[in-house]
């Protein structure tokens, strides 16, 4: 059988590094464009993977990357804006450019990474509105066969959720003030997200569908941070901040290097990141993995 080729935008990121391994095992040849190939030399060890240096993701470059591909996966996303790196550019304009480039290159299949609660009009934050706008653009693009996945917070080796809280807890002298302690999440394992993408690529019945992806349990943010502290053996007093104090913390932290917490993050957390009646993992025949079986293996 002919080896199928797929271009994965954002393939050098957290989810992407897991996805290229999963698709490589399934026989896909993965093209991964990156501005900094020297930072991802470990990816060169993966079979059926080409790490391609690029300076930008304009339409001409994308069309060249997509030439000869059977499918495209778009994993590009940012949680905070920084200078020219804006939600509009990363989540909307890029989708517009890649849709045109895919048509030019003769590629019709696209998997779009969106986010739970993404909504171009009713999203609770600029992040969620831009993710929703990009998702809609992808599905409305003429000639594209699109499946979008909309995960809750994703965990796994190398994640920026449990690992970030673990690092912050290690630096805590004894008291940890937590903004938005009642925010709700249904953390989903990166391996399950990648499996969902792999199955969608092989199943034409998923074309046109939008799948919400959640783990098997729902948690308050405070419960997740408390569990993280137990896993790393850190004893500290966790103080959940009220709404006013949470806003104050966001206003302060978004001025710090790296923007560890912003007002837009605050607004995103006002909408529970949990699935409703339908969990796309179950619809795709995937049994969701629990944090208890995965997170301790890499935090410890």
Image (spheres, rainbow, N blue to C red):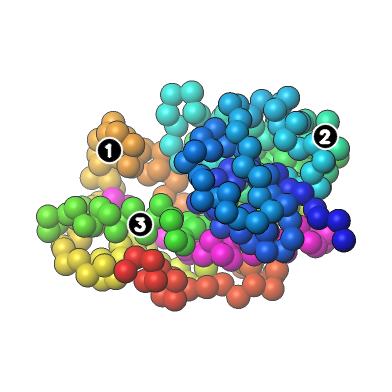
> Which residue is rendered at x = 87% and y = 61% of the image?
1
Q: For this view, does 109 lie left or right of residue 76?
A: right
Q: Position of residue 154 (x, y in %)?
A: 49, 58
Q: Position of residue 88 (x, y in %)?
A: 56, 30
**Residue assigned mark 3:** 163
Q: Is residue 196 visible?
A: no
Report, in whole angstroms, how far the alpha carbon at label 1 lies from the one at label 2. Answer: 43 Å
- Mark 1 or 2: the one toward you: 2
Q: Which one is earlier in the sequence, the residue at label 1 or at label 2?
A: 2
- Mark 3 or 1: the one toward you: 3
Q: Is residue 262 visible?
A: yes
Residue with the most extreme front position: 45
Q: Which one is earlier in the sequence, the residue at label 3 or at label 2?
A: 2
Label 3 SS: helix
Q: Which mark is residue 105?
A: 2
**Residue assigned mark 1:** 253
> Residue 62 lies in magenta, yes or no?
no
Tell me which segment is drawn in magenta.
178-206
Q: Residues within 10 Å of mark 3 (few under 14, many from 20)?
A: some
């Amino acid at each position: 059988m002919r080896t199928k080729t797929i271009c994965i935008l954002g393939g050098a990121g957290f989810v992407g590094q897991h996805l290229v391994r999963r698709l490589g095992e399934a026989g896909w040849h993965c093209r991964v464009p990156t501005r900094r190939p020297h930072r991802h030399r470990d990816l060169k060890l993966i079979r059926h993977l080409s790490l391609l240096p690029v300076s930008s993701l304009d339409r001409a470059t994308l069309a060249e990357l997509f030439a000869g591909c059977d499918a495209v996966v778009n994993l590009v996303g940012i949680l905070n804006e920084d200078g020219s790196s804006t939600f509009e550019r990363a989540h909307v304009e890029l989708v517009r450019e890649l849709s045109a480039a895919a048509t030019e290159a003769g590629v019709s299949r696209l998997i779009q990474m969106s986010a739970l609660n993404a909504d171009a009009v009713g999203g609770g934050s600029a992040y969620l509105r831009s993710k929703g706008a990009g998702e809609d653009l992808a599905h409305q693009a003429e000639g594209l066969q699109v499946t979008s996945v909309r995960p809750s917070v994703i965990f796994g080796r190398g994640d920026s959720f449990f690992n970030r809280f673990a690092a912050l807890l290690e630096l805590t002298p004894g008291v940890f003030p937590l903004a938005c302690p009642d925010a709700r999440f249904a953390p989903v394992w990166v391996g399950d997200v990648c499996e969902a993408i792999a199955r969608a690529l092989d199943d034409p019945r998923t074309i046109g569908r939008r799948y919400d992806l959640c783990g098997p349990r729902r948690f308050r943010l405070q419960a997740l941070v408390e569990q993280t502290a137990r896993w790393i053996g850190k004893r500290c007093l966790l103080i959940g901040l009220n709404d006013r104090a949470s806003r104050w913390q966001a206003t302060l932290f978004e001025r710090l290097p790296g923007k560890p917490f912003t007002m837009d993050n605050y607004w995103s957390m006002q909408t529970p990141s949990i699935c409703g009646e339908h969990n796309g993992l179950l619809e795709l025949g995937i049994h969701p993995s629990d944090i208890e079986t995965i997170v301790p293996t890499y935090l410890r």
